[in-house]
Image: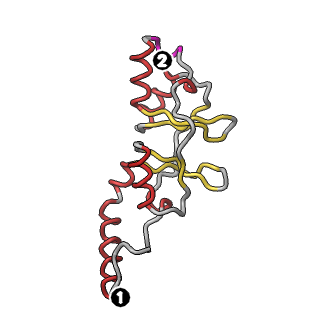
């Protein structure tokens, strides 16, 4: 069985309304030891702000973080993935989109987030699973990468 997003995602997601200031978002990142905050609009996922976004906004504007609304720096539209999708798809999306975080959405509701750190944390499990899949397919005479 191929690993699914639900197997590796983080369910506890730090969120902030899009009107929240960057100062508050930066504080929440530090307090919660996370590298991003999902920005919401009326409770629905709207975008994402990463540590890099915070630093870049401060550098480019020269303004205090308290004067910068989060919606001005949030990456939007949000790139999402569903919990049932494969980890392999996540890795490919991260590579092609050049991002490190995907918000997990199901039936238009946020279920979690999957990050490169989540993939690293589950690396051992994922490589064992890949090895098992390859062995089963070799015994059946097929390629380890067939669908």
Disc 1/disc 2 C-alpha distance (Å): 59 Å
Q: Residues within 10 Å of mark 1 (few under 14, many from 20)?
A: few
Residue 64 to residue 104: above or below: above
- The relative height of residue 69 versus residue 123 in the rendered view (above or below) is above
Foreground pick, 11 / 80: 80
At a point 62% along the width and 36% down the height, the residue shown is: 40
- Say if 112 sits above or below 138 in the image: above
Classed neighbour count for the residue bearing mark 2: other residues with Cα under 10 Å, few (<14), some (14–19), many (≥20): some
Earlier sequence position, callout 1 versus callout 2? 2
Secondary structure, mark 1, is helix
Considering every residue shown, the one lying at the far bottom of the view is 140
The magenta span reads 63-67
Residue 94 point in image, percent of width and height: 41, 49
Q: Position of residue 137 (x, y in %)?
A: 35, 82
Q: Quadrant of the C terminus?
A: bottom left
Q: Which mark is residue 108?
A: none
Image-quadrant location for residue 21: top right
Residue 66 pos. (x, y %): 52, 16
Tell me if residue 79 is in the magenta stretch. Answer: no
Is 64 within the magenta?
A: yes
User: Which residue is found at the position 30% from the left and 74% from the top?
Assistant: 131
Main SS, magenta region, reads helix
Q: Which is in the foreground here, disc 1 or disc 2? A: 1
| Relative depth, front residue between 60 and 51 | 60
At x 41%, y 55%, the residue is 92
Instruction: Tell me the tag on residue 65.
Output: 2
**The residue tagged with tag 2: helix, strand or loop?**
helix
Determine contact: label 1, label 2, CB under 8 Å. Answer: no
Residue at horizontal 65 percent and vertical 41 percent from the top: 44
Residue 112 rendering spot, x and y as whole percentages:
53, 50
Pointer 1 residue:
140
């Amino acid at each position: 069985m191929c690993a699914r997003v639900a197997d590796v995602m983080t369910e506890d997601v730090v969120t902030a309304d899009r009107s929240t200031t960057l100062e508050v978002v930066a504080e929440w990142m530090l307090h919660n030891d996370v590298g991003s905050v999902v920005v919401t609009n009326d409770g629905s996922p709207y975008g994402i702000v990463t540590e890099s976004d915070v630093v870049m906004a401060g550098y480019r504007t020269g303004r205090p973080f308290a004067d910068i609304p989060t919606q001005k720096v949030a990456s939007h539209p949000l790139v999402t993935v569903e919990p049932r999708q494969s980890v392999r798809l996540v890795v490919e999306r991260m590579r092609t989109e050049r991002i490190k975080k995907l918000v997990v959405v199901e039936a238009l509701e946020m279920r979690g987030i999957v990050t490169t750190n989540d993939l690293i944390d589950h690396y051992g499990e994922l490589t064992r699973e890949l090895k098992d899949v390859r062995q089963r397919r070799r015994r059946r005479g097929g390629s380890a990468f067939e669908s």
